[in-house]
C-alpha cells in the first residue's frame, strides 16, 4: 500500500536489557511468587522472559535511566506528512507475534529495532493515525525475534488531506456468547501501578502527573494503555496457557477507553474452538466497571488443563 510516509524506515536503534529488567516487567504486570516464580526469580530453573516484554524496547532502547519522553518521540519526524505533537498521542491498537523467545538478558548479544511506517491516516477533526511495524532483530544473525505492529492516534491533529485508511478487521466475542465468557480474570490496580510500570522505560508524563491528562480532558493521570494490554496478555496466558511462555503465539488488542489508577480491570476470555498448529484462537475484552477499555482482543494460545506444565 502506498501513501504519504508509507515505507519510511526509521534509523535502526540498538536495544539491550538485563535480567533485572525482565524481572521488573513481570512483577509490574501481575506475576506472583505463588504461580509465576519463573518470571520473577532469576535462579528458577525455568526462568523466562514474559513474551510481551519486547513491546517496551522501543521506549527503553539501551538506557537504564529515566528519559525525556517527549524529546525521544520528536527525534525522527516522518517525511511527507505534518509534524505531529507527541504530547497529544494515544495508543490505537497493538499486535505482537512471538517468533523466537527473547533471552533473559541481551548481554553478550547485539539486538536492534528495525521500524518502518505502514500507513499514515487522516481521520479528520478527531486526529491522525500513524501505523508502524517494529522488528526485534539479532544484528549478527539477522534473525527476527518479535514482530510488532502498532498505531498511534495523534489527538486533534487531522484534516491535512491525507488518506482515510482501510477498514480494520474486528475480533468480537463469539456471537451469542457475549454474556458467558469461559474465563474471567481480575486485576486490582493501586494509585501507584502506573509509577511501577513506567520504570520499564515508558516515561510518558501522562501516566505520572495530573497536568497532561487534565489538558487532554481525562481529568488527571491515566494508566499506560500498554499496562492494560500487557496485563491482559498475562491474564490470558495464566488462565489458559499454564503461564508457559511457549504457549502463546500472538496477541493483539485495541485501546478503547482510558483507565484510571486504582481501578479493577476485568478480563473476559472466550475460547473459539478454532485450532491451528496446536494453538487455539482466543477472544477477549478488558473492562472497568462494565465499560470496555480494551476491545478487538485476540490471541493464539496452546490451551492446557490445570496448573502450569513448566
Image (cartoon, helix red, strand yellow):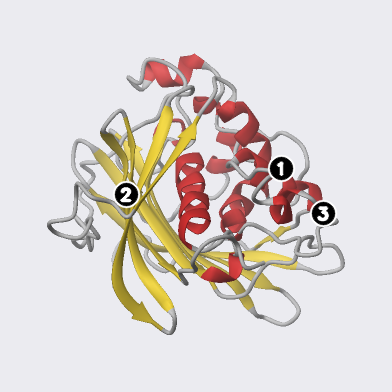
User: Taking 141 as reference, is 271 above or below it?
Assistant: above
Name which quarter of the figure residue 67 lies in.
top right
Return the x and y of residue 16 as percentages of the image width and height.
75, 57
* Residue drawn 82% across the image and 54% down it: 42
Q: Is residue 206 left or right of residue 94?
A: right
Lower sequence index among marks 3 and 1? 1
Q: Is residue 168 left or right of residue 143?
A: left
Residue 129 shows which numbered tag? 2
Return the x and y of residue 272 as percentages of the image width and height.
28, 67
Return the x and y of residue 254 as percentages of the image width and height.
33, 49
Return the x and y of residue 35 as percentages of the image width and height.
64, 50
Lower sequence index among marks 3 and 2? 3
- Name the residue nearer the viewer: 168 or 230: 230
Residue 42 shows which numbered tag? 3
* Residue drawn 34% across the image and 69% down it: 281
Q: From mark 3 to mark 2, how far is it between C-alphas?
A: 39 Å
The N terminus: image quadrant:
bottom left
Q: Which residue is mark 1?
A: 24
Q: From mark 1 to mark 2, how far is it between C-alphas?
A: 31 Å
- Answer whether residue 48 is visible to the viewer in this image: yes
- Mark 3 or mark 1, whichever is nearer to me: 3
Circle count: 3
* Residue drawn 79% across the image and 62% down it: 106
User: Taking 282 as reference, is 269 above or below it?
Assistant: above
SS state under label 2: strand
Amino acid at each position: 500500500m502506498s501513501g504519504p510516509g508509507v515505507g519510511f524506515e526509521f534509523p535502526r536503534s540498538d536495544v539491550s536489557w538485563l535480567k533485572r529488567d525482565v524481572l521488573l516487567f513481570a512483577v509490574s504486570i501481575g506475576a506472583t511468587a505463588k504461580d509465576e516464580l519463573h518470571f520473577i526469580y532469576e535462579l528458577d530453573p525455568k526462568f523466562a522472559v514474559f513474551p510481551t516484554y519486547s513491546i517496551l524496547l522501543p521506549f527503553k532502547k539501551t538506557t537504564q535511566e529515566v528519559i525525556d519522553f517527549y524529546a525521544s518521540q520528536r527525534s525522527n519526524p516522518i517525511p511527507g506528512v505534518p509534524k505531529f505533537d507527541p504530547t497529544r498521542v494515544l495508543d490505537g491498537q497493538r499486535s505482537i507475534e512471538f517468533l523466537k523467545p527473547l533471552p533473559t538478558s541481551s548481554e553478550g548479544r547485539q539486538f536492534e529495532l528495525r521500524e518502518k511506517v505502514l500507513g499514515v491516516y487522516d481521520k479528520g477533526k478527531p486526529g491522525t493515525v500513524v501505523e508502524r511495524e517494529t522488528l526485534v532483530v539479532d544484528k549478527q544473525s539477522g534473525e527476527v525475534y518479535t514482530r510488532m505492529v502498532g498505531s498511534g492516534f495523534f489527538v486533534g491533529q487531522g484534516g491535512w488531506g491525507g488518506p482515510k485508511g482501510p477498514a480494520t478487521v474486528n475480533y468480537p466475542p463469539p456471537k451469542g456468547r457475549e454474556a458467558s465468557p469461559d474465563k474471567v480474570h481480575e486485576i486490582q490496580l493501586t494509585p501507584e501501578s502506573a509509577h511501577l510500570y513506567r520504570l520499564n522505560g515508558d516515561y510518558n508524563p501522562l501516566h505520572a502527573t495530573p497536568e497532561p491528562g487534565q489538558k487532554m480532558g481525562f481529568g488527571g493521570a491515566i494508566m499506560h494503555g500498554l499496562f492494560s494490554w500487557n496485563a491482559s496478555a498475562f491474564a490470558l496466558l495464566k488462565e489458559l496457557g499454564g503461564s508457559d511462555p511457549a504457549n502463546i503465539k500472538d496477541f493483539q488488542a485495541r485501546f478503547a477507553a482510558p483507565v484510571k489508577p486504582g481501578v479493577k480491570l476485568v478480563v473476559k476470555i472466550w475460547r473459539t474452538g478454532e485450532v491451528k498448529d496446536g494453538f487455539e484462537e482466543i477472544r477477549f475484552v478488558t473492562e472497568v466497571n462494565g465499560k470496555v477499555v480494551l476491545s478487538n482482543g485476540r490471541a493464539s494460545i496452546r490451551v492446557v488443563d490445570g496448573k502450569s506444565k513448566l
